[in-house]
Image (cartoon, rainbow, N blue to C red):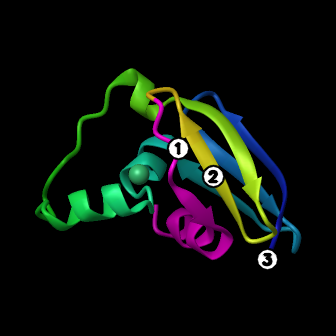
Amino acid sequence: MIPVKISIKEKQSLYIKWDDGSESLIGIKKLRRFCPCATCAALRETQSKSFIPIFGEDQISIYSINKVGSYAISISWKDGHNTGIYEFPFLKSLSENL
Ligand SMILES: [Zn+2]
């Protein structure tokens, strides 16, 4: 599945329209919390399930979104973090578990 449209809604969530006509809405905080890069994955390993992350404004503000090949997007955050590659199935799964 491939996004045909991606936009940010009111700085709160990422909206994706897929090529099959379905739509996803993913909270920006959730997107940051589940950043798939190695650094963030390692950090999550050390946290308990009840851990509630507190993010600064820049950490949950998207600076830019770039396509990675035909399978993913990368997100640059305002705090400079930009190593997370979000594959499309992963985005889909994030939105379904809201
Ligand atoms: Zn990360």
The residue to which callout 2 is attached is 74
The residue to which callout 1 is attached is 82
Task: Decide whether residue 85 is among the magenta residues.
Answer: yes
| Whether residue 47 is situated above or below residue 81 in the rendered picture | below
10 or 67: nearer the viewer: 67
The amino acid sitting under disc 1 is: Asn
Label 2 Cα neighbours within 10 Å, binned few <14 / some 14-19 / many ≥20: some
Whichever of labels 3 and 1 marks the residue nearer the N terminus, that label is: 3
Task: Decide whether residue 89 is among the magenta residues.
Answer: yes
Label 1 Cα neighbours within 10 Å, binned few <14 / some 14-19 / many ≥20: some
Residue 85 in the image, given as x and y percentages of width and height? 57, 60
The answer to whether 38 appears left or right of 15 in the picture is left
The residue to which callout 3 is attached is 1
| Whether residue 63 is situated above or below residue 69 in the rendered picture | above
The quadrant in which residue 47 appears is bottom left
| Whether residue 76 is situated above or below residue 39 in the rendered picture | above
Residue 89 in the image, given as x and y percentages of width and height? 63, 76
Whichever of labels 2 and 3 marks the residue nearer the N terminus, that label is: 3
Which quarter of the image is occupied by the N terminus? Answer: bottom right
In whole angstroms, how far apart are the C-alphas of marks 3 and 1? 23 Å
Under tag 2, what secondary structure? strand
Dot 1 and dot 2 residues touching (CB under 8 Å): yes
- The residue that appears at 70% across and 48% down in the rendered structure is 15
Q: Which residues are magenta?
A: 80-98
Residue 71 in the image, given as x and y percentages of width and height? 74, 71
Select label 3 or label 1 by which is in front: 1
